[in-house]
Image: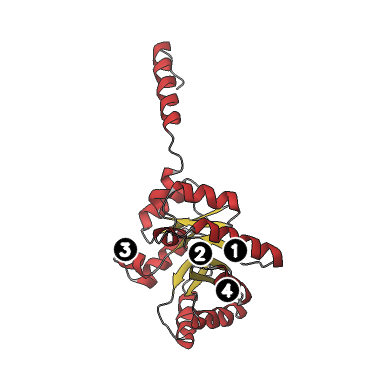
């Protein structure tokens, strides 16, 4: 499974990259706002830091405008993935941009039928939003499972990018179902290593080691 960082915060992305835990990055207008940076400037900085796909989202609502914005964003770097919403206009933009050889991430997916449309439009990634479905008492993981089954049935190459990840359990469940990618905030990714028994065991080892009076270096 590939790990994407859902953030436009350079320091946090860099820290995770130093651990080898960054296969790509996803951004959106809300994350750009949070960063306080110019979209073109911060996206270029992320692309220089991360060799994998970096999603940059269009903000237009009409297909032709999405296509124009997507082409401009794609000029930032070779690893840009143009992010478009799952609307008919977004699907048209996806088709055009994909046919031009650009990576496209179709976002705000909330149904298996939407995911099917995105695959047929040539999307590189489909982003089903797990947490937002959970928020309205629907099962976000069931959607991931349904998309996995449909894509496997027909050999679609579109990668399932599980998004709106809120907990470490979302990561585990996405991996068990077979999502190709998860994108999560840095805080969630950092929690993946946490376990009370690891902390307890390490504490016991260190106390015993202190009693030996030895040093390795």
Task: Identify the residue at image location x=59%, y=75%.
Answer: 117
Do labels 1 and 2 touch, CB within 8 Å?
A: yes
Q: Is residue 172 above or below residue 127?
A: above
Residue 52 visible in the picture: no
Residue mark closest to the camera, 4 vs 1:
1
Question: Residue reaching furthest top?
Answer: 212
Which residue in the protein does label 1 denote?
147
Which residue in the protein does label 2 denote?
128
Task: Identify the residue at image location x=31%, y=67%.
Answer: 33
SS type, badge 3: helix
Closer to the chain start, of discs 4 and 2, is 4
Residue mark closest to the camera, 2 vs 3:
2
Across and down, in percent, residue 27 comes to 42, 65
Crowd rating for badge 1 (residues with CA inside 10 Å; few <14, some 14–19, many 20+): many
Q: Residue 185 got which mark? A: none
Q: How far apart, in angstroms, are the residues tagged by discs 4 and 2?
A: 11 Å
Which residue in the protein does label 4 denote?
118
Closer to the chain start, of discs 2 and 3, is 3
Crowd rating for badge 2 (residues with CA inside 10 Å; few <14, some 14–19, many 20+): many
Q: Nearer the viewer, residue 89 or 71?
A: 89
Do labels 3 and 4 touch, CB within 8 Å?
A: no
Q: How far apart, in angstroms, are the residues tagged by discs 3 and 4?
A: 29 Å
Q: How far apart, in angstroms, are the residues tagged by discs 1 and 2?
A: 9 Å
Q: Is residue 25 above or below residue 21?
A: below
Q: Nearer the viewer, residue 178 or 186?
A: 178
Q: Nearer the viewer, residue 134 or 94?
A: 134
Which residue in the protein does label 3 denote?
35
């Amino acid at each position: 499974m590939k790990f994407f960082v859902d953030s436009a915060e350079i320091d946090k992305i860099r820290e995770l990259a130093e651990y080898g835990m960054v296969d790509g990055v996803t951004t959106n207008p809300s994350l750009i706002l949070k960063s306080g940076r110019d979209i073109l400037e911060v996206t270029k900085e992320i692309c220089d830091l991360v060799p994998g796909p970096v999603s940059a989202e269009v903000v237009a609502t009409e297909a032709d405008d999405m296509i124009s914005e997507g082409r401009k964003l794609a000029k930032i770097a070779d690893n840009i993935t143009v992010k478009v919403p799952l609307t008919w206009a977004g699907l048209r933009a996806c088709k055009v941009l994909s046919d031009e050889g650009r990576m496209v991430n179709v976002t705000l997916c909330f149904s298996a039928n939407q995911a099917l449309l995105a695959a047929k439009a040539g999307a590189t990634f489909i982003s089903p939003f797990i947490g937002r479905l959970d928020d309205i008492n629907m099962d976000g993981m069931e959607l991931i499972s349904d998309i996995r089954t449909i894509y496997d049935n027909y050999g679609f190459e579109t990668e399932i990018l599980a998004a709106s990840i809120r907990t470490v359990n979302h990561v585990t469940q996405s991996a068990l179902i077979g999502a190709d990618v998860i994108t999560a905030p840095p805080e969630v990714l950092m929690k993946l290593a946490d376990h009370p028994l690891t902390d307890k065991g390490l504490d016991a080892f260190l106390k015993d080691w202190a009693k030996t009076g030895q040093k390795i270096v």
